[in-house]
Amino acid sequence: MVKLSVTVASLKLKNPVMTASGTFGYGEEYAEYIDLNRLGALVVKGLSITPREGNPTPRIVETPAGMLNAIGLQNIGVRAFIKDKLPFLRQFDTPVIANFFGDTVDEYVRAAGELSAAEGVHALEMNISCPNKQEGWIMFGTDPKRMDHVVTEVRKTTNLPLVVKLSPNVTDIGCMAKAAEEAGADALSVMNTITGMVVDIRQRKPVLANNTGGLSGPAIRPIAVRMVWETCRAVSIPVIGMGGIMTARDALEFLIAGARAVAVGTANFINPAAAVEIIEGTEKFLIEENISDINCIIGSLKLNPLNERQPNHNADY
């Protein structure tokens, strides 16, 4: 037996594997494929005060080792989620983390307030970093002063653990991480998708109707691991790592780099059971390494001395 449980802020998770917002619907969609009780936490699709239709199509295109999406945060709205989706999730003993967003500070505050009052929401994940929106709110994720303001106001609104999801589309992720921590974030999600473009060479125009979209999948994983490592060095609050996690080996990279937990995203589209398989693979790795507690490997990264090569371990888990 090995211990897989971890603590993120005040959330006690049975294991460090959760789902990434926007890739797992509202949970019910995947319930016929996996036992939701096995997840460390379930993060639902991003919610706004009022329903959103999202961006026009086409809004998804496959890329080498990944995908580009510009869904535009389509969702049913906070009130419909609480009324129609949350009752189903209450039957499981897996913590529910509600991802939310707004176009203004007031919308963020209102969404956080309503979700915090709902029975069955255990934490909030504040999305200030979606690359698919054209409104000014994207500046919340790239301007430390604006981030400080919106996180501070939301912090006043909720007593739930507050996770801030950071954008990779910045020069210094550590600076943004510290701004979020100082404003009251209890944990950080690192990272969101990277802005990209795919061009139709026959029509000489972008494939996506939105022109640009967010790149996810294995292609971004090395960048995400580096940003998680940099974030963990910059702050003292827990970090949830995400970005291209497909296997237990991928998840372990993030944990060793310092992440307290990980979120599985694009892999859910390919394999609905990906999160559970990653949990099982992580446990297998710990047994093989004779490690009794997952917390023993969190932040255990040993940096190479300059100009010294290290062996490459390629075992699959």
Image (tube, grey):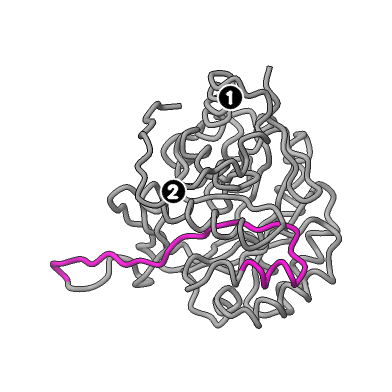
Position of 242 relative to 4 (above/below): below
In the rendered image, the quadrant that contains the N terminus is top right
Around disc 1, counting alpha carbons within 10 Å, would you say few (fewer than 14), some (14 to 19), or many (20 or more)?
some
Magenta span contains residue 192: yes
Q: Which residue is mark 1?
A: 286
Residue 61 at x, y percent in the picture: 32, 56
Vertical comparison of 75 with 95: above or below: below
> Is 83 left, or right, of 188 in this rendering?
right
Q: Tell me: 310 left or right of 240.
A: left
Which residue shows up at 74% across the image and 64% down it? 185
Outermost residue toward the left? 202
Query: In the image, what residue type sits under mark 2?
Result: Pro
Residue 11 on image: x %, y %: 78, 45
Q: Amino acid at mark 1?
A: Leu
Residue at (45% x, 39% y) in the render: 246
Is 300 contained in the magenta span? no
Q: Nearer the viewer, mark 1 or mark 2?
A: 2
Q: Which residues are magenta?
A: 177-203
Callout 1: SS: helix
